[in-house]
């Protein structure tokens, strides 16, 4: 892997942190079942424990960096141009039910640009990583997006709001794409969806309800694997907008954008 931009030190620490946090999640998962009273509190404990594991390791290695995490983590460091964006558990509902589609997501921003990304699935010991201008790797092997050229041939994934009714705009977008795409899935982890798109397991992913930590790492994975990442209308992405459209080719992106405006 090319390291011309000097991101290797950050990547190595991020991978270590993600693996340790993944082990924490697996250990907590053994402590409860879906039928137990108070399981939501246990999930919260798992989230915080995993996030604290990540924060301790990365802040110890890079004490002047800033941090933003899902579980109330917001720290402004002396070197504010470096910021870690962390989701210790993306796919909480899947985690609660024992459905093996959740992950740890860690990204490093430098001057507002994502430069390092790690997504780790502890249930399969699957590791996705990328550095700026160095490609995307899945378990050590370089990967690329599928390059599918038609929406009719595409496996699409969408995020929908929890308990959204049929009139919700996100549901309408889902239904607009459903009869045209090969299939449209809802799998419950934005970070995993983007990781799977980066290695060709999916072709399209979109959402209008995300937080920065849901998408930060996945964006770089897709871009470095040759995919496109924008907002739903094709304009430049903004991790604070809540919107993302990630596609495996320009052709599919052009085809789906009018449908997502419906």
Image (cartoon, helix red, strand yellow):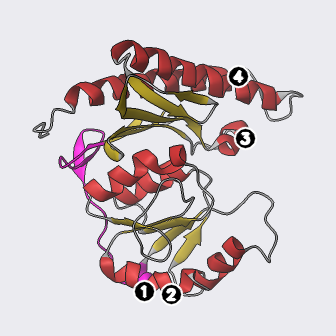
Q: Which labelled disc corresponds to residue 97?
A: 3
Please name the residue that numbered disc 4 is placed on: 45
- Mark positioned earlier in the residue sequence (2 or 3): 3
Q: Magenta region: which residues?
A: 130-153
Q: In the rendered structure, are the residues bearing label 1 and label 2 in contact, judged by CB atoms less than 8 Å apart?
A: yes
| Nearer mark to the viewer, of 1 and 3 | 1
Looking at the image, residue 114 lies above or below residue 13: below
Please name the residue that numbered disc 1 is placed on: 255
Please name the residue that numbered disc 2 is placed on: 258
Q: Residue furthest right?
A: 37
Viewer can see residue 76: yes
Q: Residues within 10 Å of mark 4 (few under 14, many from 20)?
A: some
| Nearer mark to the viewer, of 4 and 2 | 2
Judge left or right: residue 32 versus residue 99: right
Viewer can see residue 149: no
Spatial CA span between label 3 and label 4 = 16 Å
| Nearer mark to the viewer, of 2 and 3 | 2
Q: Residues within 10 Å of mark 1 (few under 14, many from 20)?
A: some
Q: In the rendered structure, are the residues bearing label 4 and label 2 in contact, judged by CB atoms less than 8 Å apart?
A: no
Q: Residue at coordinates 38% horizontally, 22% vertically from top-left? A: 78
Q: In the rendered structure, are the residues bearing label 2 and label 3 in contact, judged by CB atoms less than 8 Å apart?
A: no
- Mark positioned earlier in the residue sequence (4 or 1): 4
Judge left or right: residue 25 versus residue 104: right
Residue 152 location, x and y as percent? 45, 85
Rendered-image quadrant of the C terminus: bottom right
Spatial CA span between label 4 and label 2 = 42 Å
Looking at the image, residue 57 lies above or below residue 204: above
Judge left or right: residue 162 versus residue 23: right
Residue 225 location, x and y as percent? 27, 57
Residue 120 location, x and y as percent? 44, 36
Q: Nearer the viewer, residue 67 or 141?
A: 67
Q: Nearer the viewer, residue 124 or 45?
A: 45
């Amino acid at each position: 892997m090319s390291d011309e931009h000097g991101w290797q030190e950050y990547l190595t620490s991020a991978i270590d942190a993600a693996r340790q946090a993944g082990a924490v999640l697996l250990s907590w998962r053994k402590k409860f079942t879906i039928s137990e009273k108070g399981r939501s509190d246990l999930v919260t404990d798992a989230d915080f424990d995993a996030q604290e594991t990540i924060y301790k390791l990365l802040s110890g290695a890079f004490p002047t960096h800033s941090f933003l995490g899902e579980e109330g983590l917001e720290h402004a460091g002396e070197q504010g141009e470096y910021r870690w964006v962390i989701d210790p558990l993306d796919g909480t509902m899947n985690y609660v039910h024992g459905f093996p589609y959740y992950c740890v997501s860690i990204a490093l921003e430098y001057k507002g640009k994502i430069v390092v990304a790690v997504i780790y699935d502890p249930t399969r010991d699957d590791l996705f990583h990328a550095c700026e201008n160095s490609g995307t790797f899945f378990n050590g092997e370089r990967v690329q997006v599928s390059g599918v050229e038609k929406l009719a041939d595409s496996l699409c994934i969408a995020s929908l709001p929890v308990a959204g009714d049929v009139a919700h705009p996100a549901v309408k977008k889902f239904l607009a794409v459903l009869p045209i795409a090969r299939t449209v899935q809802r799998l419950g982890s934005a970070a995993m969806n983007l990781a799977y798109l980066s290695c060709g397991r999916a072709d399209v992913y979109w959402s209008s309800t995300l937080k920065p930590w849901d998408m930060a790492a996945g964006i770089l994975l897709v871009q470095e694997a040759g995919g496109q990442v924008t907002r739903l209308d094709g304009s430049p992405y903004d991790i604070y907008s809540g919107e993302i459209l990630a596609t495996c080719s320009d052709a599919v992106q052009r085809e789906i954008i009018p449908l997502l405006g419906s």
